[in-house]
Image (cartoon, rainbow, N blue to C red):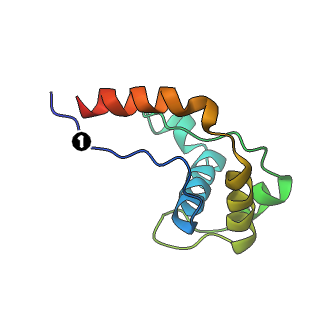
Amino acid sequence: MNYPKINIFTDNTGDFEAQYICFLAKGISLGEYQTKNPKSFYFPDLNYSSKFWRSITSNPNINLSHLFPKPAINEVKEKLISYKVDKYKEEIKRIKGDWQK
């Protein structure tokens, strides 16, 4: 079986990563992953504030081609900076190696 080549980035806290987390949060808030989408994904538990969830749920954006609210983006970026990835580095290497086989 051929698997797509992937790269796993763990220390990049740019706008795209924050946008993607907001995009996933929007899908979660709409219940899409619970009922319509059989796929799973990683959504980091960054202890999002209620202000974050309010801005995500009230925003009409449902795709990644439009920007999510700046306060939500900034909160995610702040939390990603302090997210500890060191304890997962070996597991990330193993997963990346498995995908590249």
Q: Residue at x 51, y 73 (%)?
A: 66
Quadrant position of the N terminus in the picture:
top left
Q: Nearer the viewer, residue 41 or 59?
A: 41
Q: Position of residue 20 (x, y in %)?
A: 53, 57
Q: Position of residue 92 (x, y in %)?
A: 47, 32
Q: Secondary structure at mark 1?
A: loop
Q: Is residue 62 left or right of residue 84?
A: left
Name above or below for residue 71 compared with residue 8. Answer: below
Dividing the picture into quadrants, the one containing residue 46 is top right
Q: Residue at x 40, y 29 (%)?
A: 95
Dividing the picture into quadrants, the one containing residue 62 is bottom right
Q: Is residue 85 left or right of residue 79?
A: left
Residue lying furthest left in this view?
A: 1
Q: Nearer the viewer, residue 50 or 79?
A: 79
Quadrant position of the C terminus in the picture:
top left
Taking the image as drawn, is residue 57 in sight? no
Dividing the picture into quadrants, the one containing residue 99 is top left
Q: Nearer the viewer, residue 81 or 34?
A: 81
Name above or below for residue 68 compared with residue 94. Answer: below
Q: Position of residue 42 (x, y in %)?
A: 54, 38
Q: Nearer the viewer, residue 47 or 34?
A: 47
Taking the image as drawn, is residue 43 in sight? yes
The 10 Å Cα crowd at callout 1, few under 14, some 14 to 19, many 20 or more, is: few
For label 1, the residue is 4
Q: Residue at x 72, y 67 (%)?
A: 74
Q: Residue at x 57, y 63 (%)?
A: 19
